[in-house]
Image: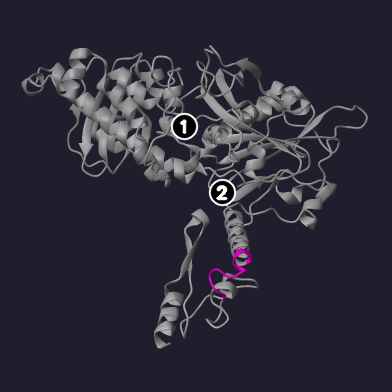
Amino acid sequence: MEREKRNDLSFSRKRSFTFGAYGSVDRFTCGDETRPESGENSILDILDSPPSNRQPLFSASSNQRGTELFEIIEKLQGSRIDEQRCEFPLPLKSQLLTIGGDLPLILPPKLGGYWVDPPLERLADVSPTSSHHGLDPETYDIMERDGEAKIYHEFFRSRYHHSFTAVDPSLGPLVLSVCLEEEESKLRVILRMKECSLHGVFSASLFPNIPSAVELAKMLCDRVTVSKFEVVSYLKAPELITTFDEHRVSPNFKFGILYQKNGQFTEEDILSNTEESEEFKELLSILGETVQLQGFTGFRGGLDVCHGQTGSEAVFTSFHGREIMFHVATKLPFTEGDPQQLQRKRHIGNDIVALVYQDGQTPFLSDVIKSHFLHCFLVVRRTRGPEDTGETAYQVSVTAREDVPPFGPVLPNPPVFTDCSLLREFILTKLINAEISCYKAQRFSRLELRTRSLLLESLQAELSTRSQCMMGDPSLSALPSSEGARGASEGTGGFIENFKRAIRVRSHSFETLGVPRKMGGSASQKPKTDKDGEGDKSPGHLSADSLGLVELKDQASPQEET
């Protein structure tokens, strides 16, 4: 008898159950040890009943108890799935949502972290008759990603100038360019450092003699401590320097477009839409032209133009000398049985800015799309126009993460457009400026600094090595297998190869952004290739996302973004 009691005690202490595939283990103990409390009809009522009341394992009610056990496990699993979803929006009956009689386009998340323009308190009157509809398109200025990126190409390459390199003990690699503009008696200088490039123009009359490279560098940055610069004598140095200076300049952009129906709050619902309303098609026609991807020769934005793996159609447009490809969710492949729609999330989740069209009064939650890259959403809703004209009007709102600086053009008051051409001008300008402004956010700025540091280090080493080869350094000439000597003999540019290699470094980029690395490969994780087996080689693709995100964004799988 005593032996049976010890067995029962041992059984109750070691007993544990795992609920489904989530790996959650609830351990139950007896005696004076603490035991988690549970609600009504808990598993403890079944499993931790006293031995005297416990039914035999093969009693008549065992099937019923087993059924109840699995029902409880299923409920626990369901609650676990719900816990992983995003926060449900505020109650729609809240007084906050009834401003002006209409629901706002955007709701900020419960935990914050996003700003919304216009704020909710400004939505008291969104009637298109209460004020002007938009601003003058001439005020829609497109921001420059790097305002000084083309200074070298504009003022130096066409004039006689010199470049110098050095490695500062505290600042790292330095590349200095000096140009004497005799017709204007000016001395123009550019100092490239890891953090930034400094540009200065000095009057030549200030110097009795032309100052040395060290003096000029210290005039731009007093933190320079190097005592000597090396002269760059490589004949193709201007080409390499221009490539570095303009690595952030691109005429190409890609944006996502989401279609939100009335009553849709979750990411799964929004990404699962397959049909397009006539109103949504009308907005797409305002933004651009629907093109066939098969054989498309313009900027493809990572879409497949050979094998149809990313759908058959897309929306494309040219805007003030820039090419824009839209990743329209409803035109990307739909996968039956996949609630997350990973084929669509692969592109939408890897964009930085997305446009949301609302077909109804349901607000958009700023954080409903889980992504490490999406930092800004432009939300558009079709609304009532002036009663006397019967025109179609569009209401616009913007939301972005809190570390994204504000950007223009400014939303009109009220934020309503009745002119389709004005709406197109505003939206496209706003999308471009949004992406440029998002690069200043913390995640992207850290990655940009890392990429620039790698490229500058490679540029300085390349210019120094090739210059020594040009001057007949026997130690380098005897090393044909070295990168510098090989590049000099082939004339192909080792810096260019290092530049391409730098922007393909995914491991460093993932560590910077806090994204976990993939431990294994799959078909959906392979980098996209063209018919020649290489990535997108359109003119702006290499430099469009020169933060090091080109390959990172194109190859990142949706599992990492979710």
Q: Residue at x 51, y 29 (%)?
A: 144
Q: Residue at x 40, y 37 (%)?
A: 448
Q: Residues within 10 Å of mark 2 (few under 14, many from 20)?
A: some
Residue kind at label 1, given as amino acid type:
Ser
Q: Residue at x 53, y 15 (%)?
A: 298
In percent of width and height, residue 490 lies at 21, 13
Left or right, residue 155 beside residue 229: right
Q: Quadrant of the N terminus?
A: bottom left
Classify mark 2: helix, strand or loop.
Answer: loop
In percent of width and height, residue 264 lies at 71, 43
Mark 1–mark 2 contact, CB under 8 Å? no
In this view of the protein, which residue sits in the foreground, 194 or 227? 194
Pointer 1 residue:
524
Please identify the quarter of the rendering in which residue 185 is found. Answer: top left
Left or right, residue 468 beside residue 311: left
Q: Residue at x 66, y 30 (%)?
A: 427
Outermost residue toward the bottom?
2
Res. 402 mark: 2
Which SS does the magenta portion mostly show? loop
Classify mark 1: helix, strand or loop.
Answer: helix
Outermost residue toward the right?
388
Q: Which residues are magenta?
A: 55-64
